[in-house]
Amino acid sequence: MSMDKRELYDGLTKLENDLQQSLEQLSEMKESLQQIVEKNTTLELENQKLREYLQELDQKNSEPEPAEDLKQDAGMSKSRMNLEKIYEDGFHICRESYGARRENDEQCVFCLEVLYRESQN
């Protein structure tokens, strides 16, 4: 069973066309990948710059103010100072009403207990 010359020629022509289409698809995919890699590199650089910027901001913000130094020396931890700031901004920090607004900035004995109780180790 041999193929005649016409079938052989037609088969090779079809294979050639299929390979050309595959090559075009491969070229398009390669170009798309190149664009993605370039965009990814750009985003990684921007991300790194943003991380460095945030780190600088954190360092500037973490430099304690004199009042904070006194509070930390008096034994108040940074987390308690954060809770105290939330409380001073007019919000409950106690378990019963955490996050709720304190009406007329009234004092809450539960919140004060959270802030000023002795830490239990």
Image (cartoon, rainbow, N blue to C red):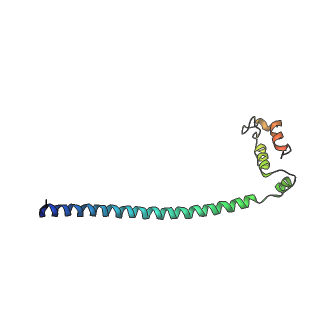
Q: What is the quadrant of residue 17 in the picture?
A: bottom left
Indicate left or right for 69 with 42 as reference: right
Q: What is the quadrant of residue 10 in the picture?
A: bottom left
Residue 37 drawn above or below residue 92 = below
- In the rendered image, residue 14, in percent from the top left (x then y), is placed at 21, 60
Residue drawn at the location 83% of the way across and 58% of the way down: 66
In this view, the residue in front, 2 or 57, is: 2
In this view, the residue in front, 6 or 116, is: 6
In this view, the residue in front, 1 or 10, is: 1
Tell me the quarter of the image containing the N terminus.
bottom left
Residue drawn at the location 47% of the way across and 65% of the way down: 38
Residue drawn at the location 60% of the way across and 64% of the way down: 49
- In the rendered image, residue 103, in percent from the top left (x then y), is placed at 76, 35
- In the rendered image, residue 24, in percent from the top left (x then y), is placed at 31, 63
Indicate left or right for 46 with 67 as reference: left
Residue 1 drawn above or below residue 76 = below
Residue drawn at the location 27% of the way across and 63% of the way down: 19
User: Taking the image as drawn, is residue 108 in sight?
Assistant: no
User: Taking the image as drawn, is residue 67 in sight?
Assistant: yes
Q: How many marks?
A: 0
- Seen as rendered, the residue at the extreme front is 1
- In the rendered image, residue 25, in percent from the top left (x then y), is placed at 33, 61
